[in-house]
Amino acid sequence: MKEKIEVIKKEIESFVASTVDELEVMRIKYLSKKGEIAALFTDFKNVSDNDKRSVGQLLNELKDIAQQRYNILKSSFLTNKKSDTDLDLTRTAEPITVGARHPLSIVQNEIIQIFSRIGFVVAQGPEIEDDWNVFGALNFPEEHPARDMQDTFFIEKSPDVLLRTHTSSVQTRTMTSQKPPIRVLCPGRVYRNEAISYRAHCFFHQVEGLYIDRNVSFADLKQVLLYFAKEMFGEKTQIRLRPSYFPFTEPSAEMDISCNLCGGKGCPFCKYTGWVEILGCGMVDVNVLKNCEIDPEIYSGFAFGLGIERITNLKFQVKDLRLFSENDIRFLEQFRAAV
Ligand code: PHE
């Protein structure tokens, strides 16, 4: 009997009526004196004494659910009833469709929120920059390939005017204009001279973070990143740091998170490694601190940088980077519920 109750319950819960007649059919089928629920009540006397209590409860519940469903559908027909007085002459001719936030904005906002909970504030700077803010202050050697025309979009040469290749330039600006303690988050668009394909674009978005104070250590960096990974990808997320190189940090590392699709077991997405790379980080190089007139004897700090497209791909499995900048409404509409 319990199974039968369950089946009828499912039927009723998924029942939709598009006309009053259909609703009446539903009423007769389930709720009338000769309906299925009444029949179950008749059968109830055959239920063993042991089961009477639980079955009785289920049966009463079923009756309530059916009645409620009927009432809801009935009232929707009443309110939808058209009459001459329903005419709303103030209504606009076309239905207004509400827009959706861009997936990159959704993810950027989430990242900002996560870091703001531990005291980071947003800092912004220009996209058109000079060599010093993007490379010079950040300890890039004169002959570094990033300074090459092939990697950087130059607007003018000597003095250099260029499109920033990373938002680390905002970190330079913050360090040269503020005194520590510094705790900033720098979101923004960056440009690199790359051939456009499904996995690379000539512009993309980053969020970089900078923390400078007395006694800041690598352990602080690791803890902040672990906190971020868990907040962004879930409590079970693990991180691993691999040694790496950036001119502006020493030591430097790249951070992987346990694959958020397979939970680290291995799948095509993480190429069966169980890990996916999400950001670069490290302790701010002493030369950078000196270039920005911060005393490395007193202060130390860490920095990290991540690509928003990458995080968005991980969260929403967008396979082609170009979709982010094509403004195809069919793509953008899919993120309406994600805000
Ligand atoms: N600026 C680096 C990049 O664009 C990211 C990064 C930031 C790495 C801070 C380490 C520290 O790839």
Image (tube, rainbow, N blue to C red):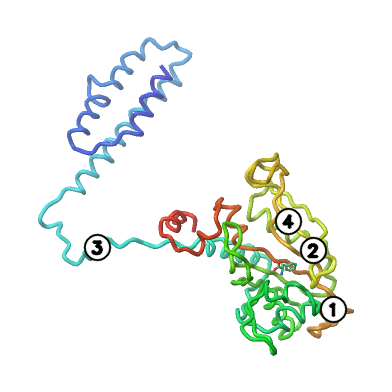
- Marks 1 and 4, how far apart at CA: 27 Å
- Marks 2 and 1, how far apart at CA: 21 Å
Q: Position of residue 210 (x, y in %)?
A: 73, 72
| Res. 173 image quadrant | bottom right
Residue identifier under label 1? 287
- Marks 2 and 4, how far apart at CA: 10 Å
Residue identifier under label 2? 220
- Hey, what amino acid is under mark 3? Glu
Of tags 2 and 1, the one toward the viewer is 1
Residue identifier under label 4? 226
Q: Is 166 on the left-hand or right-hand side of 298? A: left
Asked whether mark 2 lies closer than 8 Å to ligand 1, one says no
Q: Is residue 229 above or below residue 18?
A: below
Residue identifier under label 3? 94
Q: Position of residue 315 (x, y in %)?
A: 58, 52
Disc 4 residue crowd, few under 14, some 14–19, many 20+, Cα 10 Å: some
The residue lying toward the viewer, choosing from 22 and 308, is 308
Residue furthest bottom in the image: 159
Q: Earlier in the sequence, mark 2 or mark 3?
A: 3
- Hey, what amino acid is under mark 2? Asp
Of tags 1 and 4, the one toward the viewer is 1
Residue furthest left in the image: 84
Rendered-image quarter of ligand 1:
bottom right
- Hey, what amino acid is under mark 4? Leu
Q: Quadrant of the N terminus?
A: top left
- Hey, what amino acid is under mark 1? Asn
Under circle 1, the secondary element is: helix
Q: Report the disc number at residue 39.
A: none
Kindly identify the residue that appears in the image at 64 percent across and 45 percent down.
269
Of tags 4 and 3, the one toward the viewer is 3
- Marks 3 and 1, how far apart at CA: 61 Å
Disc 3 residue crowd, few under 14, some 14–19, many 20+, Cα 10 Å: few
